Amino acid sequence: MLRFLEDRHRQFWLLHSLGWLGFALVAFLGSLFQEMRDAYLLVVALDAYAGWLLTIPLRYFYQRIRSWRPIALIGGVLLASLLTAACWSVIKNFNYWEIYRHGFRPKDWLQYLEQTPVSFYVMLSWSGLYFGVRYYQSLQQEKQKLLTASNKAHEAQLKMLRYQLNPHFLFNTLNAISTLVMLGEADTANKMLSRLSDFLRYSLYKDPIKKVPLQQELHAASLYLEIEKVRFSERLTIVYDIADNTELALVPSLILQPLVENAIKYAVARQAAGGLIAIKARKFGHDLLIEVADNGPGMPIDSGLPKENSGLGLVNTRERLAALYDKNFSLVLTHNQPQGVKVNIRIPFEVEATDEEHS
């Protein structure tokens, strides 16, 4: 039904017919108060049908003159409404005299035009409604175009932000695989290459506009971390602390990857003994809280972001969250205790609707 009404051509015929049906109903109800005979019902029906027919050419005439200058347009509408009203007045009087007055003939033919002022008011009202509806439709169409353009720009921005993966990760991984092959550790290299393939497949084929369950994001993060664990071996420790009621919570795809990548780069890689990365998730009220912490050497922090140009991943993540959640989110970088940094994200707690909820 909604698709049927979306067509502007169908909208005209529906509103046009309903309008004249309403006119006939009002005219008939008015005749009841004047105690008119039943024959007047036929007169009202014919008058409304005549008005329905006569205003159809007005539509096509207005389509041709709608680009005229305002003064010319107003003049054209007034003249067209007056001529249509005169024709309608003649038809209405003819119907009334032929049907209700049993073939009465006035002596002066100008009497056929005596209801022209009232008819002109009706036609002018029809014209006003026509242009009002046209203006509203045009306004809605422009809004839809702006919304579509905004959504396309929004989508392009999200894709650009999400695909800004650190190329050093790919270079380091490929170099590590090459080293493993040279050392004769083909099985380890094969496993590392397989995980890299799975991770890249996930990152490329997940729509950045759509959100995914947290458990899928954790799987992608684990693929990334397993690749890095081959590089750092025992120097990298990973701890997960995920509440059971958060695994199905919806999050932006690849939202964890830049956070763990920063932890690898600025915490684990800078320490000879390596480091620890802890990923936590909790539900708090109507929000989902995610934390990625490390025990690295830390960094200067200003207003929840690194002071130096070392937080591209965090800036990228904050821009993605702002694009998806507007102001209903937070991303804060703080000092971890006893050392290191942690990133805390708060987003609305959402879960994918089930079939039962849809039905």
Image (spheres, rainbow, N blue to C red):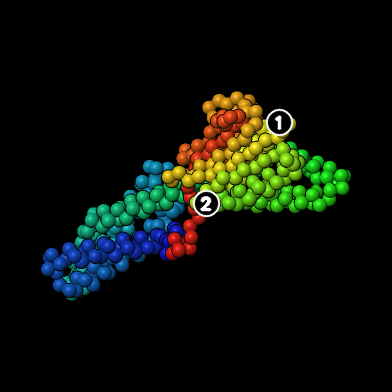
Q: Position of residue 247 (x, y in %)?
A: 54, 51
What's the amino acid at mark 2? Answer: Asp
- Horizontally, residue 178 falls left or right of residue 31, namely right
**Helix, strand or loop under label 1:** loop
**Above or below, comparing residue 237 to residue 133 in the picture:** above
Question: What number of labels is visible?
Answer: 2
In the rendered structure, which amino acid carries the disc numbered 1?
Gln
Q: Is residue 156 at all visible to an observer of this figure?
A: no
Residue found 23% across the figure and 54% down from its top: 117
The C terminus, quarter of image: bottom left
Picture layout, residue 43 above or below residue 9: below
Labelled pair 2, 1 in contact (Cβ < 8 Å): no
Left or right of residue 108: residue 359 = right
Residue holding disc 2: 244
Residue 17 lies in quadrant: bottom left
Quadrant of the drawing holding the N terminus? bottom left
266, 33: nearer the viewer: 266
Q: Quadrant of residue 301?
A: top right
Tag on residue 271? 1
Q: Which label is found at residue 63?
A: none
The image shows residue 335 at horizontal and vertical percentages of 56, 29
The one of 236 and 222 positioned closer to us in this rendering: 236
- What crowding class fits label 1: few (fewer than 14 Cα within 10 Å), some (14-19), or many (20 or more)? few
Task: Tell whether 89 sits left or right of 154.
Answer: left
Q: Is residue 227 above or below residue 27?
A: above
**Residue at the spot 19% in from the left edge and 74% down from the top edge:** 39
Which of these two is toward me, 29 or 256?
A: 256
- Residue occupying image coordinates x 65% and y 31%: 296
N-term-proximal mark, 2 vs 1: 2
